[in-house]
Image (tube, grey):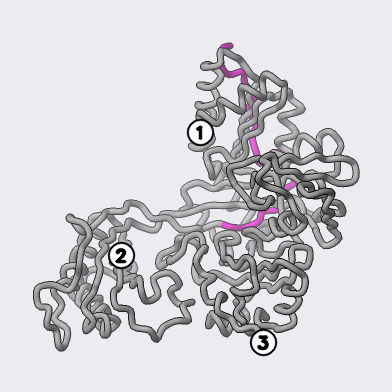
Amino acid sequence: MKRDLLLIIKAGLEKNIPVLIGTAGGSGARPHLQRCMEIVDEVLCDLGRCARVAEIASDQHRDTLISALHSGRISELGPVPPLTQDAIEKSTYIVAQMGVEPVIETLDQGAQIIVTGRCYDPAVFAAVPIRAGFSEALSLHLGKILECAAIAATPGSGSDCMIGVLDESGFTLEALSPERKCTVTSVAAHTLYEKTDPRFLPGPGGVLDLTACHFEQLDERRVRVTGTQLQKSADYTIKLEGAQPVGFRTISIAGIRAPDLIQQLDGVLEAVRDRVFANFESIDPSEAQLLFRVYGKNGVMGGLEPCVDQPPHEVGLVIEVVAETQSLADTLCSFARSSLLHFGYPGRKSTAGNLAFPYSPSDISHGAVYEFSIYHLMTVNDPVSPFPIRIQDLGVV
Amino acid sequence: MKLSDLATVIRSKNAGPFELTFDVLFANRDDFERVVRSKILSVAAFADLFRISVSDVIAVVEFEPALAIKVTIKRTRSSGAFGETDVYGAQQHAPLLSLEIPD
């Protein structure tokens, strides 16, 4: 990260272009933001420069969220369970996704480098043109394409750049590498990527509406986009994201080649599971979960696997336990692994062991396990105040 | 003819941590319209293929500007939750490849 930021910050300061870094460190919670600010300071010191740096935090206080929950200002985002006070209390870090407004605020205050917590990806691209008076809809749509580098070109690439030229009525896209070109299909198809519906792209405060969008091939390498609209919502909502710890994981990896065992594997695994919990009677099922993943059967698709009638000649097995403590997970995984290794199934000829281990020791303590606990929308009174801003001079002061 | 013979892209990916989305892209309008007409990617056909309930299919969108059909379903569990088999959802597309397109 330091190498990349050095290249960008050096060029930004030399050419007097603001440098905007969205969702610092990948998810934008406080530790990520702090680490990114340290790197920016190191880079400025290495360059022997001083710069006005803005930091915009996105972490949300639990009390604020609990009060929003009880006053009906939090709703589900898609097929997610309703939010509970318990989830708010148990989540380790809770961030909200900011739109362009806090970023524009820091530009107004003269920031040359802006580092944000969790941020709508297009916002760091759209903030500068929106502040300069360009259409919000076009600026955000352009930002949505540029934030994915050259993925909207063909052949696409996430590590190569695109240039977008915005004007009063639309924007024009061009890939910088001569090996890539933008086509109507490649640009239109990009709006599909990791989205529920390519015509309506929700973000902080509103929904980008592409139903009247027009994509025009200007020449072999350039595409012009017009007609994007922004439906502003009556209430400004921001997305909340959080995860909570659910225990500790231990896994063991093994292969099975014996045809007779593969044939009756489901029954054998059930019998091993029963034996594990019979030997640890004092353990409540809520304290520990045991799972056998069978690669070669349905390890990739689980319950969605339609192809269930073809017996494999070999399977890969992952024995997995998630339990309240690492030591309990280690113990249960070890017990399950050794029970399966020596399990005497009907007709067994290979009495020396049922599993082929690629590693010794065979079990791996995997550490803490988290699950998504918050993926909800919160209505806010204004789009700036949930995101505290701090501006300071960093580097060689 | 199979869908993989006609489509240029057949892929799956998470759309947020609670949804899984499938994109099928075509090289030209004829191919796109042929598959749209065939209804092999309708809500009912998709639910049947993946053995999920119709109510778990969130949307089927025929997006003409990109010559694409997009289907989004509820994830079996949130991404990374206990029992996860594909954290990013990138390998759930395989059953689409061999779908037969009627003449």
Query: x, y percentage for residue A44?
Result: 56, 19
Q: Which residue is mark 3?
A: B102
| Residue A42 lies in the magenta-colored region | no
- Of residues A106 and A76, the one nearer the viewer is A106
Residue at 67% in and 69% down: B70
Query: x, y percentage for residue A194?
Result: 62, 59
| Residue A381 lies in the magenta-colored region | yes
- Mark number displayed over residue A221: none
- Mark 3 burial class by Cα count in 10 Å: few <14, some 14-19, many 20+: few
Query: x, y percentage for residue A304?
Result: 49, 77
**Residue B5 to residue A91: above or below:** below
Question: Comparing marks 1 and 2, which lies closer to the viewer?
Answer: 1
Q: Residue furthest right?
A: A169
Whether residue A397 is visible: yes
Q: Chain of mark 2?
A: A
Under mark 2, the amino acid is Glu
**Residue B67 to residue A86: above or below:** below
Distance from Cα at disc 1 to Cα at disc 3: 51 Å
- Of residues A107 and B32, the one nearer the viewer is B32
- Mark number displayed over residue A320: 2
Residue at 59% in and 73% down: B4
Under mark 3, the amino acid is Pro
What are the residue bounds of the magenta stretch? A375-397
- Mark 1 burial class by Cα count in 10 Å: few <14, some 14-19, many 20+: few
Q: Which residue is mark 1?
A: A1
Residues beneath discs 3 and 2 located on the same chain: no
Q: Which secondary structure lies at badge 3?
A: loop
Q: Which secondary structure lies at badge 1?
A: loop
Distance from Cα at disc 1 to Cα at disc 2: 34 Å
Q: Is residue A19 left or right of residue A278?
A: right
